[in-house]
Amino acid sequence: MAGLRLGPLLRHVDWETGTGATVWVEADRPCEAEVRCADGAGGTARTWRIAGHHYALIPVAGLRPGGETAYRVLLDGEQVWPLPGSPFPDSTIRTPAPGTDSPGPAPVRVAFGSCRWAAPPSDASHDPVGPDALDTLAQALARAPELPRPDVLVLLGDQVYADETSAETRAWLAERRDLSEPPGEQVADYEEYTRLYYESWLDPEVRWLLSTVPSCMIFDDHDVIDDWNTSEAWQRRMRATPWWRERILSGLMSYWVHQHLGNLSPAELAADPLYAEVRAAEDGTEALREFAARADADPAYTRWSYRRDFGRTRLLMVDTRAARVLEEGRRAMLTDKELIWVREQAMDGLGGTSGFPGPRPEGPGAPGPEEPGVRGPEGPGARGGYDHLLLGTSLPWLLPHFVHDVEAWNASVCGGRRGGRWARIGEDLRQRGDLEHWAAFPESFDALTDTIAAVGGVPGAPATINVLSGDVHHAYVATPDWSRWPSRPPRSQVRQLTCSPVHNSIYASIRLGFRFGWSAAGRALGRVFKRHGRVPHSHLSWHKTGGPWFGNQLMTLTLQGRSAHLRLDQAQSDPAGGGARLVAALETDWAG
């Protein structure tokens, strides 16, 4: 009898028709996987094999728009989910009701955060990094099903920590190989990556949460290694080590299996040649390994970024790790092809192209006159194709001012503006200090800013543009100041919303550093760095309008009509006993 090894994860729910979804599972042997819903909807899929593991992404059809139905998972006809004696409510699939925008459109609730170290506490009564925000959310929803449930959970990176393993995982690794040899206590291959996903997704509360709340995911550095793709020098150093190739290939392969596929719609899956090849093969390992090798060698080879529309809310999840151009002198957070894609997807359905940043892209991959993003004001979507744009980027666009200025300084001196000696000093500091956010790629920072301004400036612009980020182990809200912007400022309300960690810690010195980064003294010192580095003047400034907050936390953005409501919840130990609870640290509203 086949057993359920991992999952189920409810991934894609169809917001266009409200009739379909996908559910991801891992079984312990080849089998037919089935989702059977209480209302008669369902679907089946045959498992496919990677490195001795068996997976299925099950398409569910026939769901009722605007409904909610419990579901079961069966393998070869035998029920494996819900688990016997489960203390949690039934896993359900909730679908939207398309076409009911007026009057009174239903809200879209987007919960998001990043950086979840999944290691279990060594003492069940005390977690050294505090309560897990995902666990706490799951407990709250399980205890009170009437509470508003997120329509989607957006996980912005560091879903697993390949370079910071738990004591239990280190003991398991020691049984497989000699930990005195590199990469030591870090994971080395695909099988060891699967151990990280088991540790994270078999957590009972998180397992139930992911089975009943749809999720969108993107990687950040710790999914592979700290500061992944910081610079050309960093990449050369890593590629010279004997263990790196197996690590990067296994990291990309496991991400494709566990996270990336579930981000895609059934139509996108049907058009994916690699997915078709893997499903058709007796064993898809070599095909996936070859794909990962080509993706690592060429940042333009594949696209990890993707788009999801939730009614009149658009989410663009942007890859800020594997799509980087690292060659000094050409450094960019995104390849030209990737940047064009982001701009096209952001502009698709909006009226006109007024204010579209920069010269019109040319060459392969450039949009044609009838393609998305270049419609005239009289064409489809002239009155506005969506109300809210969410840009999911694991790394914040707007950082504390001092941090931003130091990274801009570093990029300038590494590029040679202060000579070879300072370039060498800058590269050493870049790798030691994690100086690799948007600010460290100045032209990319400007391109993202231009894109946001352009999208917010067209006829029918979205009411709000929100950049969702994590990575920096604290939470804050920042608002750009467009008063010195050289062209027409955006009509849209623009916010940087940063939320991390979901479950991790931060050193007291780093807390002080981030607080200093937002201070007047930090801004003044940052200007000294910019002058030394001969950093060009920027037309954009910003100010912190909330935070910083430290602790394990999640943000939830509720979007309805042209209005937005933001809530920050922190996971805190319940003084009355009984585990942890979510405590609101911020609630605020804005509208376009």
Image (spheres, grey):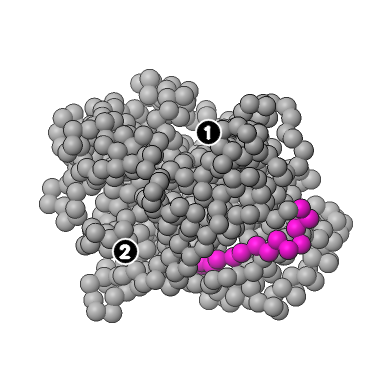
* Image x and y of residue 395, in percent: 58, 55
In magenta, the rendered stretch is 474-487
Q: Residues within 10 Å of mark 1 (few under 14, many from 20)?
A: many
In the image: residue 584, left or right of residue 238: left
- Which amino acid lies under the numbered mark 1 shown in the image of this protein? Ala
Secondary structure under tag 1 reads helix
For the N terminus, the quadrant is top left
User: Farthest residue toward the right?
Assistant: 419
Query: Relative to 76, is 117 above or below?
Result: below
* Image x and y of residue 160, in percent: 43, 51
For the C terminus, the quadrant is bottom right
Residue located 14% across and 33% down the image:
78
Query: Relative to 581, is 309 above or below?
Result: above
Q: Which residue is mark 2?
A: 136
* Image x and y of residue 97, in percent: 33, 41
Which is more N-terminal, label 2 or label 1?
Answer: 2
Q: Is residue 442 visible?
A: no
